[in-house]
Image (tube, coloured by chain):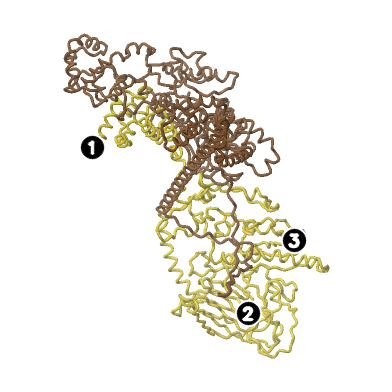
C-alpha cells in the first residue's frame, strides 16, 4: 500500500531559472535513496531478514501476545487441544452460513430508467495446488435482480441468498479466492470519464456519509453504448479469509473494460486535489446490505476472535465501505485498525534549507518508503530513523497533526554498520542448515539474552538530529566485533576462538632463549648443560611456584625426561642436580633417593625392552 | 666511511707501484731493501686483512642464509600445522550478505582482442574495508624478563620523514644518552682481537720470514719449511703502519702475546669435565657442584633464570638434613655393617657410631686392605660423585652406595676412611646453624605483628617501594644494616637469615579466600606464599583445590583476552568471559628495566606517543614494548573498569590488573595510567579501598 503523496508547490508562481534547477537537484537527490529503499522493500518482502513485529518499537504489530506465557502450564496443553477440537466442530456449523445480499438501489444521475437489472455473479478462481500457473476461473450467474434507480425511500427487496454450498468446496480443486461480481446493465448513457480512480486503500468509514450523492462531474453525452458497470467484492481471499462482514455497503461502479492503467497515486482529476472519498462523486454507486445468516436467519453474534484460518471472521457493527479492488490483498491489520482520531502526518521534504515538497498522509502511519504499517507514530519515527538512514528525519509537532522534516543525510557513507563477524562471513542466518554436519561458529552475544533498560518512549528524541554519540554508542555489550591474533594481526576464525594464545607459559622463543643462554657458558661442561636445559624447560612448562612443589617437580621430571636422561647418559649429572636442590634446602634426601630409584626403574625398563 | 675509502684507494695506488717494482729489483741498492720490504709487507698486511675480512663476510652471509632458511621452515611448519588444525575443526564460510553499494553499477569494462569478440562485464565496486591499526612486532611472555641497560642505541627511531627534519635536536640528544653509539655501526675496517690474531698468524705462516734473507725466503716460502718461533717484528711493524690507531709495533706484539696465551690456556677448558663422561676427573665437591651452585636460581628454580641476575650460592645451613637415625639393618651382603661386625643395638647416634668405628679401625684394617686389593678401583668420576653425595649423607654409607650404584657399601666405607680428611666435621657444621626455636609460634600475634609493620611502613615519610633482594649476612641478625630492613621489605624465604628472623613475613592463617583486609597477606599487598600460608590452600599443587583467591598472579590464573580494534583508539583488549569485581584479569608483563634505562627509552616512546612503561618500584620499570602479554593493549581511561596493583609475589614485585567493577564478556578493558602502580602500593589498606569506591 502506498501512502498518498500529493505534491504541493509552495511557490508556484515563482518559476525562475534557479528554481527549476533547484527543483531538479532536489528530485535527483531524493530519487536515488527512494529507489534504493524501494528495492530493499521488495527484497525484504521476498526474503525478510527481520520480522518487524519483533522490534521493540513495533510492539503493536505483534499479533500474538506473550502475556499467556506467564500463566502457561503444561497441563493446559491438553485443554487447549480439546478446545480446538470443539471449535472445529462448531466451525463446520458456521460454514453453513449463507450470505444475504440486499441491493437497495442504484445511484446514478445519468440513468434514465427507473429500474436496472443487476447481475450477480460469483467468480471462483481455482488454482492447482502445485504449479500455480494453471488457474481456472468459473463465473456463475447467480441471479439477476431488478433494482430501483436513485430510490428516495427505503424499499423492501427480496434478499438474494447465496447459499453456503457456493463457499464450500464444490470443486475438487481447493477454491482459493471467491469474488462476488455485481454488474449493472444500464440504459444507454454517457460513459463516465475513463480515469477510474481507485485507491486500493480500504478506508475506515466512520466519517463516511452515505448521503453524499451530489454529482459535480460533467459527462459528455455523445456515447450511445450500453455500458455495463460492475464491481467486484472479494468474499474469500486466498487464505480463505472472509473480507465481507455484515453491514451496509456502497460500491463504486466502474464501466467494464475501462482502463485502469492510468491510475496513479499522485494526480487525480488533472492535478486537482481529490479526497479519497470524492471518488463517489464521479461514479455510479450501488447500495446494498450484506448479512450473514445461518440457515436464513440473521447472525451477528459470532465474533469469537478465534484465529482459525477456515473460520470466517466477522466484524459486527462496523459499517464498512467496500471500494473497488484492484489489488486483491488487504492485510489484516488494516482491516482491524480503525483509529478513532484522524492523525495527519505531513512529510516536508527539505532541500537547500527550503521546503520543496510536502506530502500529507492522513490516518496513515505507513512508512512512505517501505509501506510498512507502523501502527503508532512513535514506531513510525523510530522506523524511519533506523531503517532509512540515508535521510534525516526530524519530528515537528503540527497543529493539525505531525510534521516530519525529511532531508538528505549528507553524512551517510554507506559503510557497514552491522556486526563485523557477519562481514567476515563465518556466521550468518541459515547457518544451522550446513549440510556436512555441525560446524563451529563464533560465539556472538545478541541482545536476546540481555535486555538493557530502554528509555521511555518520547518524541523528544526525534526533535533533534541524530548525533554521532547516539549512533556509535554501543548498546549491545558482548562479542560483536571481529577479533585478531595478537602476534600476527590475523583474524581469529571461529575454530580458534577458544584457544588462548597465551595459555602456555613457555613460548617457543623463550625456550630457545634459555637453551641459548645456557649454551653460551664456557665454564659449564656439556653434561651439565644438557641437564640444565632439560630441567629449565621442565620448570618453565609447569611454572612451579613454591618450594613445596619441587619434590613433585623432580618426580615428574624423571617421568617425562628419564628416558632422555638415560639416553644422553646424564644420571650422575642428575644426581648432582638433585644434591644441588638439596643444598638449596629445597628437598630432603629421601626425595633424592626416590627420584634416583625412579630413574633406575626407567633404566631397567629400557634395558628390558 | 669516506675516509676509509680514500685510504683504500691510496693503497691501490701503492699496490700498483709494487707490481712494477719487482722488475727493478736487481738494480735496487741493498739499503733500499728494508724500505722495499716494508712496502711489501704493508701490501701483504692489506691483502691478508682484506681476505680475512671477506671470508668473515661470506661466512656471515652463509650464516644468515641458513638462519633465514631455518626460519622459513619453521614458519612453513606452523602454517601446515595451522591448516591441519583448521581442517580438523570444520567451519563453514558463507558469503556475506550483499550490501547494496551506494555507488550504482553503471560502469562497464571491456576486454578487447583481435581474435575474440569484445567481452563486457559490469564494473562492481568493492565495499570499503577499514584497515586495522598498526602493530609493531613484539614477543609474548607470561613472566617478567629482566634485561640489562643498553649501552648503545639500538636503532635510530623513525617517525616519518618530516618529524626528524623538524626536530634534529631530538636525535642528537638521544645519541648523547648513548655516548653516540648506535648498534650495528659498520666496523668492517676496524680490527678486533680475533681478526688481529688471525691476521698475524696468516702473515706469519703464509709468507716467508722477513728476518731471513730475501732470496732464500722466497724459496722457503714455496717449500713451506719450518717457521720461526714467533712472528717477526716486521709483521707487527707493518700492521702498525697499516693501522696506526692500534698502537706501535711493540704494543701489538704484547697484545698478540697476551691473546695467544689466553687462547692456549683456554684449550683445556676451564670447566670441570663431565661427570658422566669418560674424561671425568676426581675433583673436590665444590668444583663438581660449582656450575650448579652458581647458576641455580633459588627463586625461579631454574638455572640461569631470566629474572634474577644475582643468584646467591646456597648457604648450606638451612638444608633439610636427613634424619639422624642410622640404618640399623645391613643393606645387603656387602654392607659395611657386616664388616664392622658390631651389633647395632646401641648405634642410634651417628656420632657414637663414628667413635666406635674409629676404635675398631685398627682391628679391621687388614680386612680392608684385602677388600681393596680385590679390584676396588675407584674411577675419578666415582670419586667426585662420592664427595658430592657424601656431604648429604655423612656416614650413612648404605645410602651413599645406593646413590653411587657402582660401588658396594663396604667399598664406599673404605673409601670414606681414606677420604676422611676431606670430611668437614658434622658437629662443627651444626654449630654454625643458629639453634632452632620451638616450631610452635604465637599465631594470634601474627596479624598484629604484620599490622604493626605495615603501619610503620605507612607512617614512614619516605614513600619508597624498593626492589627486594635476598639478604645475605651470615652470622648477623637482620637489624638496621640488613638490606631488607633498609629497603622496608620483609625478609623472604630466599634470605639467608634464619627462619625465625623477626623481619620475616609470617604468612596468613586464613581459612577463607584471602580477599579482604582480614588477611595479613592481602593487607600487605602480597600474594599468599605457598610455603607460608597453608590454611588457605595456597600450597595446593593444582589450582582447582585452592580456596585462596590471593594467588592469581603466581599461578597465572588470567582471563582469556581477545584483541580487536579499540572503540577508542588503536588496538584494544576485550574480555572473553565476564569478570566479577576485584577479580584478577591478567598480569602486566614485560621487560624489567632500570629506572635510568626507562628514562632513556621513555624519550623515544614519548616521541612515538605510545608508551608501555609501567613503574614497578623505585628501582625498576616494566616495559612491555618489546616483550609483553596481551594486556599491554589495554587503553587508558579516566573512568576505567580495571585497576593495577603491584603485589609482592614470592619475592618479586609484579603488576596485577584487576576488575574494578563487574565486567561483562566482550567489554573493552581500560585502566588509569595516571596512577602508577607504585602509587597504588603506597595507599595500602583502608585508604586505597575508599579511594576506589
- Spot the residue most to the front: B27
The residue beneath circle 2 is A104
Marking on residue A607 = 1
- 2 vs 1, front mark: 1
- Rendering quarter of residue A144: bottom right
Whole-angstrom CA distance, mark 2 to mark 1, is: 115 Å
Subunit bearing disc 1: A
Subunit bearing disc 3: A
Helix, strand or loop status at disc 2: strand
Marking on residue A351 = 3
Measuring from the top left, give residue A101's x and y in whole percent.
Answer: 57, 78
Measuring from the top left, give residue A517's x and y in whole percent.
Answer: 44, 33
Query: Residue B144, can we see it?
Result: no
Q: Callout 1 environment at 10 Å: few (<14), some (14 to 19), or many (20+)?
A: few
Which of the pair B378/A406 is nearer the observer? B378
At 46% from the left and 39% from the top, the residue drawn is A509
Whole-angstrom CA distance, mark 3 to mark 1, is: 93 Å
Please state if B54 lies on the left or on the right of A393 as rendered: left
At 19% from the left and 23% from the top, the residue drawn is B375
Query: In which quadrant will I find the N terminus of chain B?
Result: top right
Q: Earlier in the sequence, mark 2 or mark 3?
A: 2
Q: Colour of chain B?
A: brown
Where is A209 relative to B29, above or below?
Answer: below
Please state if B71 lies on the left or on the right of B18 as rendered: left
Where is A33 relative to B430, above or below?
Answer: below
Q: Earlier in the sequence, mark 2 or mark 1?
A: 2
Please state if B679 lies on the left or on the right of B275 as rendered: right
Please state if B404 lies on the left or on the right of A328 as rendered: left
Helix, strand or loop status at disc 1: helix
Query: Residue A32, can we see it?
Result: yes
Amino acid at each position: 500500500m502506498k501512502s498518498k503523496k500529493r505534491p504541493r508547490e509552495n511557490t508556484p508562481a515563482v518559476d525562475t531559472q534557479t528554481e527549476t534547477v533547484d527543483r531538479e537537484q532536489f528530485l535527483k537527490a531524493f530519487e536515488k535513496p527512494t529507489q534504493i529503499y524501494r528495492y530493499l522493500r521488495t527484497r525484504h518482502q521476498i526474503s525478510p531478514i527481520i520480522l518487524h513485529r519483533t522490534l521493540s518499537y513495533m510492539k503493536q504489530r505483534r499479533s500474538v501476545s506473550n502475556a499467556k506465557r506467564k500463566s502457561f502450564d503444561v497441563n493446559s496443553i491438553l485443554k487447549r487441544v480439546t478446545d480446538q477440537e470443539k471449535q472445529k466442530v462448531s466451525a463446520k456449523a458456521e460454514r453453513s452460513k449463507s450470505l444475504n445480499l440486499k441491493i437497495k438501489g442504484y445511484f446514478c444521475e445519468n440513468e434514465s430508467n427507473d429500474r436496472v437489472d443487476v447481475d450477480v455473479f460469483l467468480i471462483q478462481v481455482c488454482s492447482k495446488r502445485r504449479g500455480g500457473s494453471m488457474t481456472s476461473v468459473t463465473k456463475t450467474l447467480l441471479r439477476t435482480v431488478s433494482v430501483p434507480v436513485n430510490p428516495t425511500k427505503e424499499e423492501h427487496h427480496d434478499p438474494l441468498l447465496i447459499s453456503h454450498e457456493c463457499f464450500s468446496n464444490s470443486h475438487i480443486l481447493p477454491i482459493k479466492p471467491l469474488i462476488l461480481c455485481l454488474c449493472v446493465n444500464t440504459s444507454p448513457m454517457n460513459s463516465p470519464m475513463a480515469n477510474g480512480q481507485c485507491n486500493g486503500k480500504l478506508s475506515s468509514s466512520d466519517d463516511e456519509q452515505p448521503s453524499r450523492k451530489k454529482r459535480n462531474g460533467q459527462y459528455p453525452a455523445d456515447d450511445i453504448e450500453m455500458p455495463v458497470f460492475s464491481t467486484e467484492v472479494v468474499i474469500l481471499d486466498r487464505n480463505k479469509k472472509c473480507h465481507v462482514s455484515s453491514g451496509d455497503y456502497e460500491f463504486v461502479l466502474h464501466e467494464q473494460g475501462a482502463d485502469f492503467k492510468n491510475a496513479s497515486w499522485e494526480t487525480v482529476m488533472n492535478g486537482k486535489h481529490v479526497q479519497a472519498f470524492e471518488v463517489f462523486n464521479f461514479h455510479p454507486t450501488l447500495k446494498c446490505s450484506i448479512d450473514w445468516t445461518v440457515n436464513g436467519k440473521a447472525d451477528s453474534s459470532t465474533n469469537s476472535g478465534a484465529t482459525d484460518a477456515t473460520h470466517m471472521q466477522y466484524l459486527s457493527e462496523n459499517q464498512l465501505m467496500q471500494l473497488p479492488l484492484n489489488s486483491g490483498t488487504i492485510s489484516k491489520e488494516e482491516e482491524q485498525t480503525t483509529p478513532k482520531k484522524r492523525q495527519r502526518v505531513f512529510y516536508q521534504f527539505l532541500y537547500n534549507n527550503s521546503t520543496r515538497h510536502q506530502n500529507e498522509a492522513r490516518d496513515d502511519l505507513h512508512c512512505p518508503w517501505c509501506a510498512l504499517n507502523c501502527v503508532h507514530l512513535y514506531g513510525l519515527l523510530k522506523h524511519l530513523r533506523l531503517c532509512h538512514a540515508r535521510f534525516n528525519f526530524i519530528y515537528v509537532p503540527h497543529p493539525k497533526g505531525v510534521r516530519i522534516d525529511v532531508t538528505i543525510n549528507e553524512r551517510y557513507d554507506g559503510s557497514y554498520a552491522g556486526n563485523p563477524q557477519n562481514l567476515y562471513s563465518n556466521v550468518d542466518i541459515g547457518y544451522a542448515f550446513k549440510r556436512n554436519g555441525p560446524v563451529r561458529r563464533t560465539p556472538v552475544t545478541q541482545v536476546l539474552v540481555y535486555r538493557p533498560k530502554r528509555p521511555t518512549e518520547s518524541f523528544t528524541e526525534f526533535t533533534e538530529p541524530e548525533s554521532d554519540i547516539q549512533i556509535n554508542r554501543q548498546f549491545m555489550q558482548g562479542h560483536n566485533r571481529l577479533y585478531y591474533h595478537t602476534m600476527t594481526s590475523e583474524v581469529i576464525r571461529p575454530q580458534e576462538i577458544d584457544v588462548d594464545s597465551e595459555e602456555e607459559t613457555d613460548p617457543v622463543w623463550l625456550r630457545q632463549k634459555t637453551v641459548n643462554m645456557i649454551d653460551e657458558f664456557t665454564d659449564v661442561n656439556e653434561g651439565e648443560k644438557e641437564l640444565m636445559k632439560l630441567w629449565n624447560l621442565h620448570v618453565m612448562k609447569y611454572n612451579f611456584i613454591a618450594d613445596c612443589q619441587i619434590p613433585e617437580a623432580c618426580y615428574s621430571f624423571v617421568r617425562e625426561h628419564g628416558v632422555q636422561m638415560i639416553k644422553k647418559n646424564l644420571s650422575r649429572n642428575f644426581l648432582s642436580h638433585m644434591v644441588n636442590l638439596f643444598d638449596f634446602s629445597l628437598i630432603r634426601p629421601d626425595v633424592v633417593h626416590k627420584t634416583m630409584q625412579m630413574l633406575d626403574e626407567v633404566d631397567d625398563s629400557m634395558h628390558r625392552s | 666511511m669516506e675516509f676509509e675509502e680514500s685510504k683504500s684507494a691510496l693503497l691501490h695506488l701503492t699496490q700498483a707501484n709494487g707490481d712494477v717494482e719487482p722488475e727493478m729489483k736487481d738494480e735496487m741498492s741493498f739499503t733500499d731493501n728494508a724500505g722495499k720490504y716494508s712496502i711489501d709487507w704493508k701490501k701483504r698486511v692489506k691483502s691478508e686483512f682484506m681476505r680475512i675480512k671477506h671470508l668473515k663476510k661470506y661466512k656471515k652471509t652463509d650464516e644468515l642464509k641458513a638462519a633465514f632458511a631455518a626460519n622459513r621452515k619453521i614458519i612453513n611448519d606452523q602454517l601446515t600445522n595451522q591448516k591441519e588444525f583448521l581442517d580438523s575443526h570444520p567451519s563453514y564460510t558463507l558469503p556475506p550478505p550483499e550490501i547494496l553499494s551506494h555507488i550504482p553499477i553503471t560502469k562497464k569494462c571491456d576486454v578487447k582482442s583481435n581474435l575474440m569478440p569484445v567481452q563486457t562485464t559490469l564494473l562492481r565496486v568493492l565495499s570499503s574495508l577499514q584497515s586495522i591499526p598498526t602493530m609493531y612486532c613484539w614477543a609474548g611472555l607470561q613472566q617478567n624478563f629482566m634485561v640489562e641497560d643498553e649501552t648503545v642505541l639500538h636503532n635510530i627511531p623513525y617517525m616519518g620523514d618530516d618529524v626528524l627534519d623538524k626536530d634534529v635536536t631530538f636525535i642528537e640528544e638521544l645519541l648523547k644518552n648513548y655516548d653516540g653509539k648506535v648498534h650495528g655501526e659498520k666496523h668492517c675496517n676496524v680490527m678486533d682481537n680475533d681478526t688481529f690474531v688471525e691476521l698475524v698468524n696468516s702473515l706469519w705462516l703464509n709468507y716467508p720470514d722477513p728476518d731471513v734473507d730475501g732470496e732464500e725466503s722466497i724459496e722457503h716460502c714455496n717449500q713451506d719449511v719450518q717457521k720461526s718461533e714467533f712472528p717477526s717484528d716486521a709483521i707487527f711493524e707493518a700492521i702498525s703502519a697499516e693501522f696506526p690507531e692500534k698502537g706501535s709495533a711493540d704494543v701489538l706484539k704484547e697484545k698478540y702475546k697476551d691473546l695467544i696465551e689466553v687462547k692456549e690456556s683456554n684449550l683445556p677448558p676451564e670447566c670441570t669435565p663431565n661427570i658422566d663422561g669418560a674424561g671425568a676427573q676426581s675433583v673436590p665437591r665444590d668444583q663438581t657442584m660449582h656450575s650448579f651452585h652458581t647458576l641455580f636460581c633459588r627463586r625461579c628454580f631454574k638455572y640461569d633464570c631470566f629474572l634474577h641476575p644475582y643468584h646467591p650460592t646456597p648457604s648450606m645451613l638451612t638444608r633439610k638434613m636427613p634424619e639422624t637415625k642410622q640404618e640399623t639393618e645391613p643393606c645387603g651382603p656387602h654392607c659395611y655393617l657386616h664388616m664392622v661386625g658390631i651389633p647395632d643395638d646401641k648405634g642410634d647416634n651417628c656420632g657414637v657410631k663414628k667413635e666406635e668405628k674409629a676404635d675398631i679401625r685398627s682391628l679391621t684394617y687388614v680386612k680392608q686392605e684385602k677388600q681393596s686389593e680385590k679390584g676396588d678401583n675407584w674411577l675419578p668420576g666415582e670419586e667426585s660423585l662420592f664427595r658430592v653425595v657424601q656431604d648429604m649423607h655423612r656416614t650413612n654409607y648404605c645410602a651413599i652406595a645406593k646413590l653411587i650404584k657402582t660401588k658396594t657399601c663396604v667399598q664406599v666405607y673404605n673409601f670414606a676412611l681414606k677420604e676422611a680428611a676431606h670430611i668437614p666435621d658434622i658437629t662443627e657444621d651444626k654449630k654454625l646453624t643458629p639453634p632452632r626455636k620451638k616450631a610452635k609460634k604465637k599465631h594470634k600475634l601474627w596479624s598484629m605483628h604484620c599490622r604493626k609493620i605495615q603501619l610503620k611502613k605507612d607512617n614512614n615519610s619516605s614513600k619508597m617501594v624498593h626492589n627486594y633482594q635476598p639478604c645475605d649476612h651470615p652470622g648477623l641478625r637482620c637489624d638496621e644494616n640488613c638490606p631488607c630492613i633498609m629497603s622496608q621489605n620483609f625478609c623472604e624465604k630466599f634470605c639467608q637469615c634464619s627462619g625465625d628472623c623477626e623481619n620475616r613475613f609470617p604468612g596468613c592463617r586464613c581459612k577463607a579466600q584471602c580477599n579482604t583486609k582480614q588477611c595479613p597477606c592481602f593487607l600487605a599487598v602480597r600474594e599468599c606464599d605457598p610455603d607460608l600460608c597453608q590454611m588457605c590452600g595456597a600450597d595446593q599443587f593444582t589450582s582447582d583445590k585452592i580456596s585462596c583467591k590471593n594467588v592469581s598472579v603466581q599461578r597465572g590464573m588470567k582471563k582469556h583476552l581477545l584483541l580487536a580494534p579499540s572503540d577508542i583508539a588503536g588496538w584494544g583488549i576485550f574480555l572473553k568471559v565476564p569478570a566479577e569485581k576485584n577479580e584478577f584479569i591478567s598480569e602486566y608483563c614485560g621487560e624489567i628495566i632500570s629506572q635510568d634505562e626507562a628514562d632513556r627509552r621513555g624519550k623515544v616512546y614519548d616521541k612515538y606517543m605510545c608508551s608501555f612503561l609501567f613503574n614497578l618500584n623505585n628501582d625498576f620499570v616494566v616495559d612491555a614494548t618489546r616483550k609483553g602479554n596481551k594486556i599491554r593493549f589495554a587503553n587508558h581511561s579516566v573512568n576505567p573498569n580495571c585497576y593495577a596493583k603491584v603485589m609482592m609475589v614470592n619475592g618479586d614485585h609484579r603488576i596485577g590488573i584487576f576488575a574494578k567493577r563487574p565486567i561483562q564478556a566482550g567489554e573493552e578493558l581500560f585502566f588509569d595510567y595516571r596512577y602508577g602502580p607504585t602509587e597504588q602500593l603506597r595507599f595500602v589498606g583502608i585508604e586505597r579501598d575508599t579511594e576506589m569506591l
